[in-house]
Amino acid sequence: LKSGIDILVGTPGRIKDHIQNSKLDLSSVKHVVLDEVDHMLDMGFAEQVEEILGFAYKKGSENNPQTLLFSATCPRWVYDVAKKYMKDEYEQIDLIGKKTQRTATTVEHLAIQCRSSQRAGVLGDIIQVYSGSRGRTIVFCETKREANELAMNASLKQ
């Protein structure tokens, strides 16, 4: 950090620690990218994120960083942050087509209760029914460990 950096990736807590310990100066930041902004809100990071952004932005300055916010859903907080830190003429691109919290109409959601030990087998059956033997599927997991366990499970190997 002392000799300068081109890209900084970090959790709000860790970035805030570096700022408070005078190890990180955000006054010359050129771009800010916030991914999964809706999840930051869900996890209680809204206040920390706004505090960090305050170190990179100067009110009324033309030299504020370009800001990109990515969010699967757009709760009110996302719009509030956009208005507060982005230029008045900011561009919102809505891939769903409406400024509300909803999923794409082409996505089907299933909820099937099963034991943890049965998960891979049930998932394999669902994939077979909906995708067939040649279909391609993306499975999202909460942890890398869970993803690795599913990836190595014989029930999902085809």
Image (cartoon, rainbow, N blue to C red):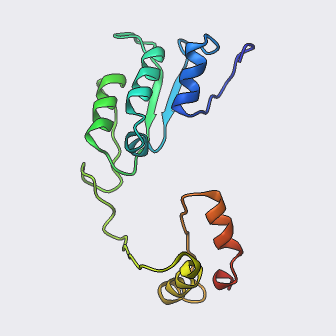
Residue at 29% x, 24% y is 88
Q: Report if residue 66 is visible in the image.
A: yes
Residue at 38% x, 33% y is 46
The x, y position of residue 101, in whole percent, is 27, 53
Residue at 49% x, 89% y is 129
Q: Nearer the viewer, residue 37 or 42?
A: 42
Q: Report if residue 87 is visible in the image.
A: no
The x, y position of residue 34, in whole percent, is 47, 36
Q: Quadrant of the N terminus?
A: top right
Q: Quadrant of residue 111?
A: bottom left
Q: Quadrant of residue 14?
A: top right
- 109 w.r.t. 124: above or below: above
Q: Nearer the viewer, residue 88 or 7?
A: 7
Q: Quadrant of the C terminus?
A: bottom right
Q: Nearer the viewer, residue 152 or 30?
A: 152
The x, y position of residue 78, in whole percent, is 33, 37
Q: Quadrant of residue 5?
A: top right
Residue at 33% x, 31% y is 82
